[in-house]
Amino acid sequence: GQNIDQPTEMTATEGAIVQINCTYQTSGFNGLFWYQQHAGEAPTFLSYNVLDGLEEKGRFSSFLSRSKGYSYLLLKELQMKDSASYLCAVRGEEADSWGKFQFGAGTQVVVTP
Amino acid sequence: DTEVTQTPKHLVMGMTNKKSLKCEQHMGHRAMYWYKQKAKKPPELMFVYSYEKLSINESVPSRFSPECPNSSLLNLHLHALQPEDSALYLCASSQEPPGSNYEQYFGPGTRLTVT
């Protein structure tokens, strides 16, 4: 099974930086994903880490440490439209669980003017 | 085309009704998924299809019956649902491993209300 933890809510001002942490305990691991979900809408893919290190994509960066079971999503130059829930998800490794994306509860980011 | 479509967008059904949710993708993905999401909760995996065969069933009650008629279509047949089954039902697709990119593409969802 998998246990994925992330903070419930974070608030930051427009233009600032916010770091959302995610810790996981899994019996198998084949990648960690970050998704953004606006209220009432479907999740949209932000980033994917399978090796240790930092992946950068414009204003968003994601970091992974497999030995620590830890990832973070960094959002820079926050904009009001970044107010959303950010979901950390881990994919299983075993042949019968590769399709199992288990999601954390999500971190609601509130961007204030 | 990186779109997953779902119909209907909204569905209200009684506990004795039979209805179906539909999902379609034309990205050539051979893995398709059904998720259930309650308000302010993360998506919960229900079923995974790989090459049109059911590969994962997360102990979902039999009143939910998935079907994958071909590589582009995924259905979820609903029968004798309970009010607690009211939720947003999300369909997703992804490449089959060992593809280099495992990301899932989600459809907009069907908001289901059981009365």
Image: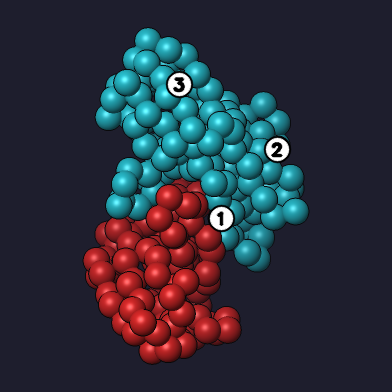
Q: Residue at x 66, y 34 (%)?
A: B73
For mark 2, name the chain. B
Residue designated by label 2:
B72
Q: Is residue A41 visible?
A: yes
3D distance between C-alphas at marks 3 and 1:
24 Å
Residue designated by label 3:
B78
Colour in which chain A is drawn: red
Q: Which one is earlier in the sequence, the residue at label 3 or at label 1?
A: 3
Residue designated by label 1:
B104
Question: Residue B40 location in percent, x, y?
Answer: 30, 52
Q: Residue at x 44, y 83 (%)?
A: A78
Q: Which amino acid, by three-letter code, is at mark 2?
A: Ser
The residue closer to the viewer here, B81 or B101, is B81
Q: Is residue B48 visible?
A: no
Q: Is residue B81 above or below residue A43?
A: above
Q: Which one is earlier in the sequence, the residue at label 2 or at label 3?
A: 2
3D distance between C-alphas at marks 1 and 2:
15 Å
